[in-house]
Image (cartoon, helix red, strand yellow):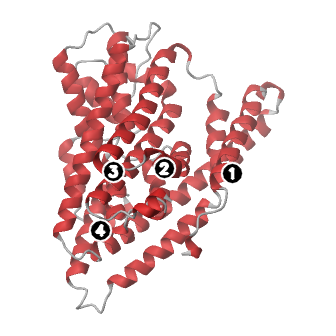
Amino acid sequence: MKTLDAPKNLTRNVLIGMGSGVLIASIFYYFQTTIPSDFFQIIEKYVFNLGGQVFKNLLLLIVVPLVFFSLVSGISSLSNMVKLGSIATKTVGLYLLTTGIAVSLALFFGWIFNLSGYEGEVDAYVPTQGSADLYETVLRIFPNNIFGAFVENNMLGIVFISILFGIALNLTDDLTGGLSKNFERLNIVFLKIVLLIMSFAPVGVFCLIGSYVMAKGLNVFGDLAQYVLVLVFVLVFHLTFTYSLILKVFANLNPFKFFKKMRNVALFAFSTSSSAATIPVTLKTVSDDLGVKKDVASFVVPVGATINMDGTAIMQGLATMFIASTVGVDLSLTQYGQIILLAMVTSIGTAAVPSAGTVTLALILGSVGLPLDAIGLILAVDRILDMIRTSVNVCGDAAVSCIVAKSENELDENMFNK
């Protein structure tokens, strides 16, 4: 459909925006002593911070209605309700599998590279507000107020409500005069809004990247260099090896085609550090470029943004090893198994927002008897690493979408290979 074509040269323009943001913000940061402080603060607050937050808000603005209408229209168009159960089972199973592989790789490479700890002073850590409690997570799936779930951006609850509404609409479509067609039309409208927002992506990415560099500069790693390098290596390895492997083994799909079409989504995820904010772009790419039919994409992608946290699991595994080394604790084989299990379970309760993984990291550290204060070390470099982790997460969402779609004969392979 011509009206839903993506903006031309988007990848090139986003990369230009990203590079320009880093360059200009670096100039301001490293020459701030020669720049009037009032001017520096105005540029930081009203250009980079404000511009980046506006772009992020626009993406988040469209997430809830897009997920709702996409999921409802996809489920209401299913000819067989048994298919929904099959899609859900495969989706959750694959997400748990990749998360388990992710944290296992983190612990394996941490051991291979003999990850050492930090030798300096550790500042006190103030726990982040949030919950990774399994009880609360299950309750969020079944909200007691439909509108409250939407207002609070409770993605687990929104997915459940959308599924319930979609099933009811499917079963009553003949009684409502084909009401499901109207939801399909509304879904197209919201997809168009996504494309309009994407037109401003180069400017938005320029501001988001610039905001970070203006605040922190480029030299943020310091004594944590080994932890950072190992973490980046494992993230890239998981992204390229694990996802390529599951695409080939489970669906016999070409990984090179997949990654080429996912570059825009990865860039968006990198700049926003939020799987939720990237949902609109992920859905658009998975449906229109990778050939996944909407009834699969509209379920797998929103669920993935909520429970698929491979990048976060990798961080939690390596961070736990790093902190254990810092305080001189040798972890047992049983504790390693405990870390893998907890990383898999708590990933379901991790919010799809920047640095939310530190909330669940506190739970894992407490379970193996490590001090929470050392999380302060991780936070010092977490912002830039969170950007990479989010890119890994959304690529995982798309890979699982393709695999589930292929298994359900809901993948247009001609479009995937185009």
Q: Residues within 10 Å of mark 1 (few under 14, many from 20)?
A: some
Q: Position of residue 39 (x, y in %)?
A: 79, 39
Sequence-wise first label, 3 or 1? 1
Residue that appears at 47% across and 53% down? 277
Which of these two is toward me, 110 or 367?
110
> Mark 1 highlights which residue?
13
Viewer can see residue 48: no
Secondary structure state at the residue bearing disc 4? helix
Circles 3 and 1, Cβ within 8 Å, touching? The answer is no
Q: Residues within 10 Å of mark 2 (few under 14, many from 20)?
A: few
Sequence-wise first label, 4 or 2? 4
Which of these two is toward me, 131 or 279?
279
Q: Quadrant of residue 112?
A: top left
Q: Quadrant of residue 339?
A: top left
The label nearer to you, 3 versus 2, is 2
Sequence-wise first label, 3 or 4? 4
- State the separation of the CA atoms marked 3 and 2: 15 Å
> Mark 3 highlights which residue?
400
Which amino acid type corresponds to the residue marked 4 in the rendered image?
Ser
> Mark 2 highlights which residue?
257
Residue 409 bears which disc, if any?
none
- State the separation of the CA atoms marked 1 and 4: 35 Å
- State the separation of the CA atoms marked 3 and 4: 20 Å
The label nearer to you, 3 versus 1, is 3
The label nearer to you, 1 versus 2, is 2
- State the separation of the CA atoms marked 4 and 2: 31 Å
Sequence-wise first label, 1 or 2? 1
Residue 162 bears which disc, if any?
4
- State the separation of the CA atoms marked 1 and 2: 21 Å
The label nearer to you, 1 versus 4, is 1
Q: Residues within 10 Å of mark 3 (few under 14, many from 20)?
A: many
Q: In the image, is residue 289 above or below residue 394?
A: below
